[in-house]
Image: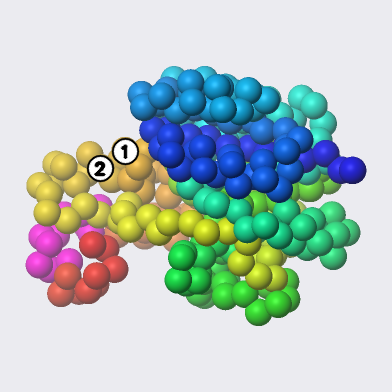
Amino acid sequence: MPSIAVLLTCFNRKPQTLKCLESLYKLNRHASVFLVDDNSSDGTFQAVAETYPQVKLIEGDGKLFWNRGMYLAWTVAAKQNFDYYLWLNDDVVLHEYSLNELMECVELTNDQAIISGIIVDQNNKVLYGGSNKNRTLIIPNGELQDITYLNGNVVMVPKSVFETLGNLDPKYHHDMGDVDYGFRASAHGIKVYSTRKAIAFGEKNPICRERQSGATINQRFKRLYSPLGSNPKLNFYFRKKYKSIFNATGYYIFQHLLNLIPDNLNTHIFGNKYK
């Protein structure tokens, strides 16, 4: 049996975290789980320790957020040299066939590609998984489909891919690390595919990271530069690396202008895109 390290990070979502782990252990009661708790105050750490003592719990300092938490979990797990590394968001509930689907997909690619699981809501509407080069969300069609913009909700990374790409980039705080990993894979000639069907239920995150409506300019910029915002410096770093200095500079200017204009002008120009 191939060995799989399941990587998670969590913060103050005890019910969701426990439900996610429950769905995982129903599928594989021997799963090797590495969970970073980023200093939760709602008892998540204690609840996981009591309910699932087999989980390798790693304590964060409250400043890791998703990307750096996953980086830490992967760093610890990689010391044991697993065959596969499975990223798992703590707010998803896996379908009963999810692990089989992921393994079949990596086998179809001879363990040479990254496989991203398609996530749907309770109404079977696709929420995550990845988007194509036109930023259109991938809809399952029974075949592997190319992903350009990777979502890190449920992602299988074979050992061979990890040996080439390494860990997530710790420069990112919360988001963008998954997209960066997908772009890095492409730069190395490694494909990123979706699963052939949806493999988990999830919840839509409606937060706009680019701009906070109903706030003062100071509040908007404070949020923009926070780990939960869309930090212009990190966007510049990403776009310069994968696109061009001109693209990076243009987007840097755009982000600042977007947060300077009033709400009514934002809505007039962009509709609901940045609300």
Residue at 67% in and 33% down: 33
The quarter in which the C terminus is drawn is bottom left
Answer left or right for 126 relative to 154: left
Kind of residue at disc 1: Ser
Whether residue 214 appears in this view of the structure is: yes
Residue 133 in sight in this render = no
Quadrant of the snapshot with the N terminus? top right
Q: Which residue is pictured at 12% across the width and 54% down the height?
A: 214
Q: Is residue 75 above or below residue 113?
A: above
Indicate which disc residue 226 carries. 1
Where is residue 226 shown, x and y percent of the image? 31, 38
Say whether residue 96 is left or right of residue 158. Answer: left
125 or 97: nearer the viewer: 97
29 lies left or right of 66: right
Instruction: Tell me the CA gap for discs 1 and 2.
Output: 5 Å
**Residue under pointer 2:** 223
Circle 2 Cα neighbour tier, 10 Å, few/some/many (<14 / 14–19 / ≥20): some
Task: Classify mark 1: helix, strand or loop.
Answer: loop
Magenta segment: does it hold 58? no
Q: Quadrant of residue 147?
A: bottom right
Instruction: Write the start and end of the magenta stretch as one range.
Output: 256-266
Main secondary-structure element of the magenta-colored stretch: helix
Q: Residue furthest bottom?
A: 141
Q: How is the image coloured?
A: rainbow
Mark carried by residue 52: none
> Measured along the vertical axis of the image, is residue 8 above or below residue 52?
below
Q: Amino acid at mark 2?
A: Arg
Question: Closer to the camera, 122 or 202?
Answer: 122
Name the secondary structure under disc 2: helix
- Which quadrant of the structure image shows residue 149? bottom right
Vertical side of 78 occupied by 112: above or below? below
